[in-house]
Image (cartoon, rainbow, N blue to C red):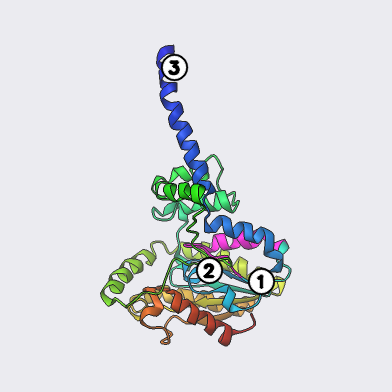
Amino acid sequence: MKGFVKHLFIFVLPLLVLAALGEALVRHYPNSYRYKSEWMDCHADSVQTLLMGASHIYYAVIPDSLGHAAFNLSNVSQLYEYDWFLLDRYSSRLGRLRNLVLVIDDSSPFDAPMEQLPEDWHRCIYYRLYMDYDKHSLWSKYGFELSSYTTFRRKLMPALRYVLTGESTLDCDSLGFGTAFATPASFDTAMMRRESDIAIERHRCKDWNLVKTNSDYLFKIADWCQRRGVRLVLVTTPMWSGFYSKIDPKQLQVMYDLAQQCVDRYGAEYKDYLRDRRFQGTDFRDGDHLSRQGAEKFTRILRDEVGGF
């Protein structure tokens, strides 16, 4: 028996060492979560305009073109729960904050917890490891990059190249704007329709009870802004006509009702660009996300029409 244990240990030990090295390597590789956390740790007290929410704002507003002292603290699939965590985390250091721009869209009131989503649960790891959100233990599966083997494997070779050459593919700019969506060379209507159908189904409400959970976090953010004298601007970003025409009208109405509640109860402002016809063709990367070209246009519109940044 002792011999078996010894041989097992000899077999397993190199695998554990390799796993630990791989974990350390991937954690060392730059990512938007760690970058934004470290940026805020250093500069939160200088921010005057904060952009928050999920990918619709991450890829839509360029802080450097918006106005003075703006930063984009959004990330892909970032729920109001995480917006609230980040706002609360930096609350004591946001003394100069004047504007909070927060996205509200057809899916945000209906988003399920990321832990329940096969395509998104791994993002909980990033908030735990790189943004210090202690919702989960560091010894749970959310405390290790290796827990999500698919994403771990995808990042392993770029992480190794980064160590060897310093080459990084960080997908946001210095002020947090998502840079992964370039301007397409042409507008492919058939592809847009296919991708829009998939996205519409992904955004379709599966549990109407989620509205209360998400709206509670939204109202916490709105209340924080009201108490601090911070201007809250809720924004629905432009979407392609072939996308928004297929959104469930009931979901849209819930979105509009929540936005109006924030306006009536907390003095927020609401700007609806969902059906803005100024955005066409290559302004879109896909049905519900702007391309770099569209983001440049949308940022100018916010700066000129909403103002105060």
Residue at the spot of label 2: 177
Closer to the eye: label 1 or 3: 3
Q: CA distance from mark 2 to mark 3?
A: 52 Å
The residue at which mark 3 appears reads as 6
Magenta stretch: includes residue 12: no
**Image quarter in which the C terminus is found:** bottom right
User: Label 1 to label 3, Cα distance in Å?
Assistant: 61 Å
Q: In the displayed image of the protein, which residue is found farthest to the left?
A: 190
The answer to whether 130 appears left or right of 7 in the picture is right
Element on which disc 2 rests: loop
N-term-proximal mark, 1 vs 2: 2
Q: Residue at x 48, y 32 (%)?
A: 17
For the residues bearing labels 1 and 3, Cβ distance under 8 angstroms: no
Q: Quadrant of the N terminus?
A: top left
Label 3 Cα neighbours within 10 Å, binned few <14 / some 14-19 / many ≥20 = few
Instruction: Where is residue 143? Give x, y as percent.
Output: 53, 44
> How would you rate the neighbour count of disc 1 (Cα within 10 Å): few for under 14, some for 14-19, many for 20 or more?
many
> At x 59% / y 74%, what residue is drawn?
64
